[in-house]
């Protein structure tokens, strides 16, 4: 591995430590609980409206699997279609290369400021920071991204990066960061403040940068799904548009969009349809940007594709339904995951894109789950997240090698379990631990066992084992 | 030296990929509803747009009524909307030659037609075709009055996509601009038109 992949944030603590800190923040937990409860209820309602929801999920899964199986063919096809319609296609192996391509393009336009549509791909590669270092200011125009940017904060949710902030906190951020302060902390007034703050920038911007929700290989059509109209502003008004998209964002044909334009809005914002969806193919004379650049980003995706179990994470359409149902996410929030991709999907996507299980923080992410499976149930493209989590846990253990305390303990346990006499002797010894218990619970185990009782109580071991009890009471039967 | 393109494609080709599975398309391509216009009305209204059902012949009168009610004085308009839509008592600014952006930002609203409407999701699709103009026309003004003809209305998303030409610049509009970014609660009105008014002409 060469340069570090910025998909996980440098210096983030391992998940258990970050979670421990996040859990102490009661305001954060209140904000998250309120938001996730609201969206869960709404989503269930709009999903129930469609009798064919399960069939749509299956189609979505199959289309994305087809994309992964024929990725090279479809990418070349997309490149050809976009080029034929007047666009320019660039390829980037990693974050650094993508950032350099974008910076060079912006410089070629002579711009020192760009407007941005919310995009996970550009957040993943740390584009804003790279542009800043190159003397270009990137202005986030999505309301939640603006809140994060003005608050000098980090995102905590895929769809709603400022979900950890409530209205009062957002008002404070706006007061500090805007020339005109919001009239109140009512969401309507906060939205109005954002509108005024960004209006001039939209009307005068020369270059816009976006991500893509989908790209149609056959037609070269790019799709951006949004709510506020900031996307339309960026995609329509500037002279130059630069779109950065992960290579897995493809769908083969125009018809395939009929599946995803039903799955995505209902899973994501829990709407029948999001307010605005823009579709464009290359350049249209007299309508919209005169120059269009498409940057196709690998950044760990081909390595993820190579993992037969883990590759299903590449089906993800970034709806964030899995975050909203996750009991772990609801309590720790997104920042504890130390990546732009938090929650259950982040726990499997971030470590795979980072591609380094020797990195303690990345290797801790697959453990950020109780494996309850709620994420799998809501996933619109049926990513079996628990399956990938356990698979990656095995990878993490393998990466640690054979000399860790955990590996030694497991080897010892295997030795004990292999022989009934040893097993029984161990049980007897274990029952002594009940001396540590109060009211049937052990709050603190000594030695390495303390790691277990740090975050939960252990039940006391009964005085007598089941085997001993059986021998005493049922010996005579046979 | 390999180009990034060659290297990425080579990385993909080096992977043992599963053979493609047939894509099940047994989901519903269309849905039968007793009153498709009624459903469109209900669903567009549900997303906080203002909806009126109107007989085709009454269109000019209704347009005049709506604009008068809002005290609109200047309206941008694609140059090819039916001339009778450009009712008197309002200054119409046809987008031919293209209106400068700064001017578009000062008009009271815009009047357009549409390409397709999806009843089930309450969505109107513009494709920059007849009576719709370029994309920024229906974006910059704060009020969008849109005429939907009954024969443009379909029930489902698959039916709508089948009618659309993917090479055109398309805008799917479901209600006025909105955000759910504050506490995941939906609020209408951010950067796009804050008022969307729809006339369904039968």
Image (spheres, rainbow, N blue to C red):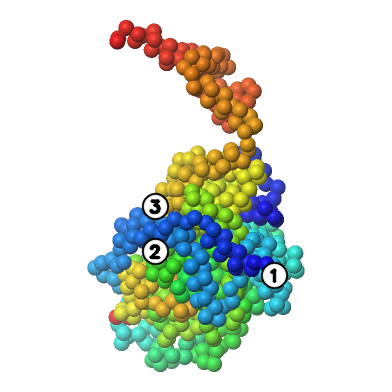
Q: Residues within 10 Å of mark 3 (few under 14, many from 20)?
A: some
A433, B114: nearer the viewer: A433
3D distance between C-alphas at marks 3 and 1: 42 Å
Q: Residues within 10 Å of mark 1 (few under 14, many from 20)?
A: many
Disc on the earlier residue, 2 or 1: 1
Visible in this render: residue B187? no
Labels 2 and 3 in the same subunit? yes
Labels 3 and 1 in the same subunit? yes
Relative to A466, is B153 above or below? below
Q: Residue furthest left?
A: B34
3D distance between C-alphas at marks 2 and 3: 18 Å
What residue is shown at x 39% (from left), y 79% (from top)?
B115
Q: Which residue is mark 3?
A: A44
The answer to which quarter of the image holds residue B5 is bottom right
Determine the secondary structure under disc 3: helix
Residue B134, percent across and down? 50, 83
What residue is shown at x 58% (from left), y 44% (from top)?
A365
B161, A161: nearer the viewer: B161
Chain of the residue under label 2 = A
The answer to which quarter of the image holds residue A96 is bottom right
Determine the secondary structure under disc 2: helix
What residue is shown at x 67% (from left), y 53% (from top)?
A1
Determine the secondary structure under disc 1: helix
Chain of the residue under label 3 = A
Relative to A197, is A344 above or below? above
Chain of the residue under label 1 = A
Q: Which residue is mark 2?
A: A259
Disc on the earlier residue, 2 or 3: 3
């Amino acid at each position: 591995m060469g340069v570090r992949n910025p998909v996980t944030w440098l210096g983030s603590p391992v998940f258990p430590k970050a979670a421990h800190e996040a859990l102490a923040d009661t305001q954060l937990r209140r904000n998250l609980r309120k938001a996730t409860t609201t969206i869960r209820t709404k989503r269930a309602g709009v999903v129930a409206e469609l009798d064919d929801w399960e069939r749509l999920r299956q189609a979505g899964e199959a289309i994305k699997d087809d994309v992964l199986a024929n990725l090279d063919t479809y990418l070349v096809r997309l490149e050809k279609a976009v080029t034929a319609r007047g666009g320019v296609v660039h390829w980037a192996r990693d974050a650094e290369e993508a950032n350099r391509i974008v910076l060079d393009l912006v410089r070629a336009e002579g711009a020192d400021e760009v407007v941005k549509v919310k995009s996970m791909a550009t957040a993943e590669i740390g584009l804003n920071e790279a542009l800043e270092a190159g003397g270009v200011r990137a202005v986030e125009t999505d309301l939640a991204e603006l809140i994060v940017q003005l608050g000098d904060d980090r995102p905590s949710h895929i769809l709603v990066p400022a979900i950890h902030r409530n209205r009062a906190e957002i008002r404070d951020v706006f007061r500090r960061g805007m020339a005109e302060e919001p009239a109140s902390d009512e969401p309507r007034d906060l939205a109005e403040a954002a509108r005024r703050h960004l209006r001039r920038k939209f009307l005068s911007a020369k270059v816009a940068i976006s991500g893509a929700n989908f790209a149609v290989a056959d037609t070269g059509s790019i799709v951006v799904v949004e709510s506020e109209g900031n996307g339309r502003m960026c995609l329509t008004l500037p002279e130059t548009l630069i779109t950065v998209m992960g290579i897995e964002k493809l769908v083969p044909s125009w018809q395939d969009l009929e599946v995803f334009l039903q799955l995505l809005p209902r899973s994501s914002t829990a709407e029948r349809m999001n307010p605005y969806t823009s579709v464009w193919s290359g350049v249209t004379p007299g309508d919209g940007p005169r120059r269009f650049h498409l940057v196709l980003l690998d950044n760990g995706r081909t390595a993820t594709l190579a993992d037969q179990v883990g590759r299903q994470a590449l089906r993800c359409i970034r709806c964030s339904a899995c975050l909203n149902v996750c009991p772990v996410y609801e309590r720790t929030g997104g920042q504890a995951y130390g990546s732009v991709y938090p929650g259950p999907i982040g726990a499997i996507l971030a470590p795979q894109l980072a591609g380094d299980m020797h990195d303690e923080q990345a290797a801790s992410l697959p453990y950020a789950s109780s494996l309850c499976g709620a994420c799998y149930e809501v996933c619109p493209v049926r990513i079996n997240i628990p399956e990938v989590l356990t698979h990656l846990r095995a990878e993490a253990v393998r990466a640690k090698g054979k000399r860790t305390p955990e590996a030694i303990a497991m080897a010892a346990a295997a030795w004990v379990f292999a022989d009934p006499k040893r097993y029984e002797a161990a049980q007897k010894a274990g029952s002594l631990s009940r001396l540590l218990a109060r009211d049937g619970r052990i709050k603190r185990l000594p030695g390495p066992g303390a790691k277990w009782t740090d975050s939960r109580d252990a039940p006391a071991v009964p005085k007598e084992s089941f085997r001993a009890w059986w021998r005493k009471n049922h010996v005579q039967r046979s | 030296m390999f180009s990034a393109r060659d290297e990425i494609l080579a990385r993909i080709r080096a992977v043992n990929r599963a053979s493609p599975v047939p894509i099940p398309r047994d989901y519903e391509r269309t849905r039968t509803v007793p009153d498709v216009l009624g459903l469109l009305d209900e669903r567009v209204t549900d997303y906080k747009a203002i909806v009126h059902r109107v007989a085709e012949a009454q269109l000019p009168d209704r347009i005049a009524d709506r604009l008068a009610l809002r005290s609109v004085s200047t309206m941008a308009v694609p140059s090819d909307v039916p001339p009778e839509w450009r009712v008197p008592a309002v200054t119409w600014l046809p987008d031919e030659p293209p209106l400068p952006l700064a001017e578009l930002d000062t008009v009271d609203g815009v009047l357009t037609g549409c390409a397709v409407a999806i009843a089930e999701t309450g969505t109107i699709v513009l494709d920059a075709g007849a009576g719709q103009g370029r994309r920024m026309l229906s974006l910059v003004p704060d009020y969008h009055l849109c005429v939907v003809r009954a024969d443009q209305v379909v029930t489902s998303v698959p039916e709508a996509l089948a009618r659309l030409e993917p090479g055109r610049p398309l805008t799917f509009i479901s209600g006025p601009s909105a955000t759910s970014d504050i506490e995941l609660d939906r609020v209408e009105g951010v950067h796009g038109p804050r008022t969307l008014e729809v006339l369904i002409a039968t």
